[in-house]
Image (spheres, rainbow, N blue to C red):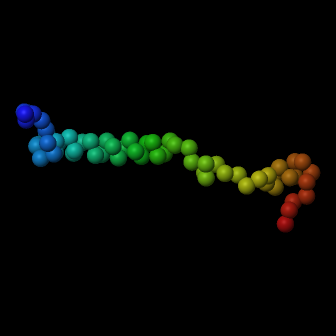
Amino acid sequence: MALVGTATSSTPAAARTRLWSAPLVALWRGIVRDLSYRPELHYMRGPGPAWRAKHGIPERR
């Protein structure tokens, strides 16, 4: 029993869908990538010179 009226990848409707869906998918992936938490951007290596000056600790060399 064959299905009548199903869209395959060779139909004009499928081609039109690919034309607008690919940029939409790329946009969505870009938004998700930009909004996701990336810990390497927030990594701190420890107290800096301002913290040491405030707490009276001599600066390391």
* Residue 5, percent from left and from top: 8, 33
Task: Locate the N terminus by quadrant.
Answer: top left
Looking at the image, is 22 positioned above or below residue 49? above
Residue at the (83%, 49%) spot, across then down: 51
Residue at the (73%, 55%) spot, across then down: 45
* Residue 11, percent from left and from top: 10, 43
* Residue 17, percent from left and from top: 20, 40
The image quadrant that residue 12 belongs to is top left
* Residue 8, percent from left and from top: 14, 42
Residue at the (36%, 44%) spot, across then down: 27
Residue at the (31%, 42%) spot, across then down: 24
Q: Would residue 21 be found to the left or right of residue 29 on screen?
A: left
Which residue occupies the foreground of this view, 53 or 57?
57
Looking at the image, is 57 positioned above or below residue 2? below
Which residue occupies the foreground of this view, 56 or 26?
26
Task: Locate the C terminus by quadrant.
Answer: bottom right
Q: Seen from this angle, which residue lies furthest bottom? A: 61
Question: Number of labelled discs?
Answer: 0
Q: Would residue 4 be found to the left or right of residue 47 on screen?
A: left
Q: Would residue 44 be found to the left or right of residue 26 on screen?
A: right
